[in-house]
């Protein structure tokens, strides 16, 4: 599997950020310790010299001998000095929690933290490399890697948090001879919050969302289809699926992971078939697709995916939590680096498995059938996506009866005869919910039956005489129910999207925006209020304080003297951008709802501006 430039650049960027997150704070702390130690050693030696030269009872040789001891063993080195002759000096200077002890301990902590960071990066590379070996090592690599990343993350947050708190005291104490309690408390609370998030995320249970929109097809509903699938499974020497689920999504897939279909929880082997795709495929072409999917059962692909899938979901949830929790960003990037390396291994394996399943299907049915089915599926998916995208881009409210199915069925063959068709198909991928599939041309090349792009149209224009959809008694009813629900949800999503896109040009559009973004009022002290609406933020008398168009950035500030919102404006000042402060005294427990509403309404305005 070759790396494209975008992937290479993204990997290098994440590697750079991972290195910064692992080494920046420890390196800064180590640099400060070395600088401070050098300065303190020099100051200490001067005081020793002054004391020695002030001693009128000592000879010159005694004075030099006295000074020589401290010159050879400055305070920064004494804690690690095991020589007997400096034992008393060491015991006095290195008393636990003394200044010398603190700087000595912090220097060792920073060094070992950086060594640990190097070991962690090497481990990420090693574990990522193991994932390329085979599927067994993929699972082992990820289980070990997941545990290692969690332990390393906890260690990094605690150690770098300790450095941050220590620096918040000593940097100002060293350079300004004073310290700021508020600064120490702020850094300490940020670290504690990071630790709390780490602990919460470790024990958080993440539910895998394996809901599939479809309905069960029993043997009574499609006896010939079930017989055909059992026959192919027997030829492959595998057990047939435990259930067939039919729907209107543009893909076929198999899985051994638990599925939620309607109100039913399905376990065992499941095969999903697309009724719209079955209608454009001949039985021979559909057999090739079904054979491809069954081949994934034989190769153990579905079992491996079912085993690894929940762990990937949990890991991704954990990593996302690290990104959103502030100080835990020191953890996010190296965990994301491991995830990227592992995903590259997964994608490489996925492509190999798809090629193998294609070759199996070609032997089971025919190379021609698999190539033609790939073209038809890609063509249908492209045209349906184009049709739905055009509908969603409309600037007026849609009805809930959109007729997408009929529009795609009627327009697919004219699309196949159009001048845009071949260009769209050259880079086509076959849709699939679990795997990243190789390009269409590569897959046809692998089965030994490549089709010229100029011949794709003829393949799509060929109308099958009979299809497996005709053999599913409940197919029409399933499609009718599924399309009705799909189009209703599509129309609702479009209606909500319009509320984001409209810059109200008339009363009707204004009312539409207000339906989703009504004014929200928050009570402040002394009967004052602040209102957030789609235009901006207004004060008690209704006067608009702030228009969203003028906002560049927002920062919520918590203070014992009253919370506030600092707004960075698009307007330039003498130095940088101008700012304004909206006082929020008395907002109390409304803080989180206020932040959520402000973020939501400002996001709407940004989407609206991009759309206009």
Image (tube, rainbow, N blue to C red):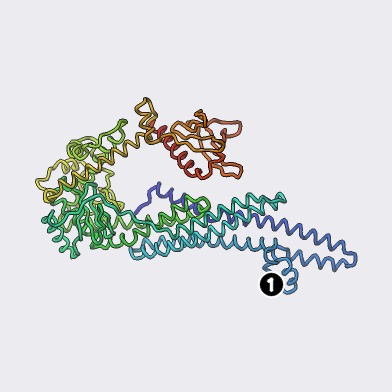
Q: Residues within 10 Å of mark 1 (few under 14, many from 20)?
A: few
Q: Residue at x 48, y 61 (%)?
A: 122
Outermost bottom residue: 84
Residue 388 falls in which quadrant of the image?
top left
Residue sitting at x 17%, y 61%:
233
Position of residue 317 measured from the top left corner of the image (x, y, whole percent): 41, 54
In the foreground, 297 or 376: 297
**Where is the C terminus found, in terms of image quarters?**
top left
Q: Quadrant of residue 516?
A: top left
Residue pointed to by mark 1: 82
Secondary structure beneath label 1: loop
Tell whether 414 sits left or right of 329.
Answer: left
Query: Where does residue 79 sit, x and y in percent of width and height?
Result: 68, 67
Q: Residue at x 32, y 31 (%)?
A: 395
Q: Give the position of the N terminus as an image quadrant.
A: bottom left
Residue for point 41% across, 57% down: 315
Residue furthest front as drawn: 527
The front one of 133 and 146 is 146
User: Front-most of 65 and 150?
Assistant: 150
For the image shown, how many numbered marks are present on the structure?
Answer: 1
Q: Is residue 368 visible?
A: no
Whether residue 278 can be seen here: yes
Task: Tell whether 48 sits left or right of 186.
Answer: right
Q: Is residue 96 above or below residue 225?
A: below
User: Where is residue 97 drawn, in percent x and y?
Assistant: 67, 63
Q: Where does the image place residue 476, in percent across and percent down from the top left?
A: 15, 46
């Amino acid at each position: 599997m070759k790396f494209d430039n975008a992937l290479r650049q993204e990997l290098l960027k994440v590697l750079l950020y991972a290195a910064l997150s692992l080494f920046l704070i420890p390196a800064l702390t180590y640099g400060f310790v070395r600088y401070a130690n050098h300065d303190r050693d020099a100051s200490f030696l001067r005081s020793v010299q002054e004391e020695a030269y002030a001693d009128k009872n000592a000879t010159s040789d005694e004075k030099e001998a006295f000074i020589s001891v401290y010159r050879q063993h400055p305070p920064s080195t004494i804690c690690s000095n095991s020589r007997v002759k400096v034992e008393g000096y060491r015991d006095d200077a290195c008393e636990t929690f003394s200044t010398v002890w603190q700087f000595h301990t912090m220097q060792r902590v920073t060094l070992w933290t950086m060594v640990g960071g190097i070991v962690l990066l090497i481990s990420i590379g090693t574990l990522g490399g193991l994932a390329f070996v085979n599927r067994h090592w993929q699972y082992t690599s990820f289980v070990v890697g997941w545990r290692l990343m969690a332990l390393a993350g906890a260690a990094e947050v605690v150690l770098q948090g300790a450095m941050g708190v220590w620096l918040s005291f000593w940097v100002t104490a060293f350079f300004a001879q004073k310290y700021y309690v508020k600064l120490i408390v702020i850094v300490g609370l940020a670290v504690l919050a990071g630790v709390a998030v780490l602990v919460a995320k470790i024990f958080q249970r993440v539910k895998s969302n394996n809901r599939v929109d479809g309905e069960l097809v029993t043997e009574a509903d499609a006896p010939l289809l079930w017989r055909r699938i059992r026959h192919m499974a027997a030829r492959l020497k595998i057990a047939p699926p435990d259930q067939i689920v039919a729907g209107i999504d543009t893909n076929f897939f198999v899985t051994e992971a638990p599925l939620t279909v309607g109100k039913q929880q399905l376990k065992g082997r499941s095969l999903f078939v697309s009724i719209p795709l079955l209608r454009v495929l001949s039985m021979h072409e559909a057999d090739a697709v079904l054979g491809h999917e069954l081949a994934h059962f034989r190769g153990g692909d579905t079992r491996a995916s079912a085993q690894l899938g929940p762990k990937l979901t949990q890991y991704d949830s954990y990593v996302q939590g690290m990104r959103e929790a502030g100080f835990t960003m020191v953890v996010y990037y190296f965990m994301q680096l491991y995830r990227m390396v592992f995903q590259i291994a997964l994608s490489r394996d996925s492509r190999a498995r798809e090629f193998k399943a294609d070759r199996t299907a070609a032997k089971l049915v025919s190379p021609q059938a698999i190539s033609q089915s790939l073209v038809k599926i890609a063509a249908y998916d492209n045209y349906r996506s184009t049709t739905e995208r055009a509908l969603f881009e409309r600037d007026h409210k849609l009805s809930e009866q959109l007729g997408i199915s009929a529009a795609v069925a009627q327009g697919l063959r004219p699309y196949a005869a159009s001048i845009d068709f071949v260009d769209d198909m050259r880079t086509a991928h076959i849709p699939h919910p679990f795997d990243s599939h190789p390009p269409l041309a590569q897959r046809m090349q692998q089965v030994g039956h490549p089709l010229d792009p100029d011949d794709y149209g003829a393949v799509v224009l060929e109308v099958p005489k009979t299809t497996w959809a005709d053999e599913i008694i409940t197919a029409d009813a399933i499609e009718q129910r599924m399309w009705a629900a799909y189009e209703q949800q599509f129309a609702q999503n479009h209606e909500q999207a319009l509320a984001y896109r409209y810059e109200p040009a008339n009363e009707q559009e204004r009312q539409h925006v207000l339906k989703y973004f009504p004014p929200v009022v928050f009570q402040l002290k002394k009967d004052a209020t602040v209102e957030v609406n789609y235009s901006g933020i207004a004060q008690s008398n209704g006067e608009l304080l702030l228009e969203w168009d003028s906002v560049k950035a927002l920062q919520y500030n918590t203070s014992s003297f009253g919370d506030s919102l600092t707004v960075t404006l698009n307007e330039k000042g003498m130095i940088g951008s101008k700012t304004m402060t909206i006082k929020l005294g008395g907002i109390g427990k409304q803080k989180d709802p206020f932040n959520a509403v402000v973020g939501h309404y400002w996001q709407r305005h940004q989407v609206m501006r991009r759309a206009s």
